[in-house]
Image (cartoon, grey):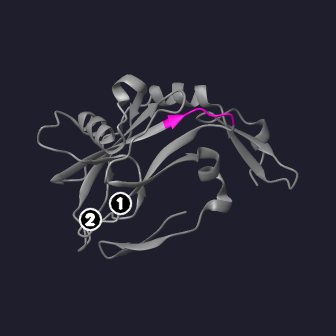
Amino acid sequence: GVEGAADSPPLLGLHYSHDSANRVCMSLAFPQLIKRRARHSKPDKNYGPVQKKAAVAIVLQPSDNGPVMLMIRRAVREGDPWSGHMGFPGGRRDPEDVSSLACALRETREELGLDLETSAEAVCELADVNTGWRPDRPEMLVTPFVFVTEGCPRLQPNHEVDGIVWVPLAFLLDQRHRVPLSWEWRGTAVESD
């Protein structure tokens, strides 16, 4: 357990309490979480020369049971290294995209028919994520953007999307739903929590 967690002030909108089995439980104060994220500034990270870039939209919405996050299941396609994977709407940055934000907006509109400029509020840009290089896929720098939408927007998935799900953030924060992962990155063994 976390000592004194119930008495601690909220961290990023997370509130701690104990359930009947004395496990630490978290709940999200969604408006406070969004206000704090809106003040977030993107950290500078130098990944070196990464040629390929992409952007994704992390779309959040309040619900009666706490905030939920929009995720898609990518369609299964030969030659697509992310074929069938769960992910956020988004994709590779085209030469016509004036910015990574423009890429995230365009890709979300193409994949889901969701116009984030009119149906959501942009909250912040998060740190870039380097996908790393593997023989079966290119190294890519992905820029995530956080958006908030009220109500459930009408979604029209295109051929790139096999499924859409709104995932409760509480589910993702619950340690019972996590499994450790191991992989090799440039000759070094890496583990996640």
Residue at image x 53%, y 26%?
A: 150
**In the foreground, 112 or 19:** 112
- Give the amino acid at mark 2: Asp
Q: Residue at x 20, y 45 (%)?
A: 93
User: Compared with residue 138, is residue 187 higher up or lower down, i.e. above or below?
Assistant: below
163 in the magenta segment: no
Q: Quadrant of residue 81?
A: bottom left
Quadrant of the frame with the N terminus: bottom right
Measured as percent of width and height from the top left, residue 53 is found at 21, 49
Corner quadrant of residue 147:
top left
- Residue 75: which disc? 1
Is residue 135 left or right of 37 when viewed as pictured? left
Residue 11 is left or right of residue 157, and the answer is right
Mark 1 touches mark 2? (CB < 8 Å): yes
Residue with the mark numbered 2: 80
Nearer to us of marks 1 and 2 is 1
Is residue 23 shown left or right of residue 42?
A: right
Query: Which residues lie in the magenta part?
Result: 60-64
What is the spatial separation of the Cα atoms under label 1 and label 2, in whole angstroms? Answer: 9 Å
User: For the residue carrying disc 1, how many other residues have a C-alpha within 10 Å: few (<14), some (14-19), or many (20+)?
Assistant: some
| On screen, residue 119 above or below 70 | above
Vertical comparison of 165 with 134: above or below? above
The percent position of residue 126, horizontal first and vertical second, equals 38, 39
Q: Earlier in the sequence, mark 1 or mark 2?
A: 1
Spot the residue most to the right. 20
Q: Main secondary structure of the magenta part?
A: loop
Disc 2 crowd, CA 10 A, few/some/many (<14, 14-19, 20+): few
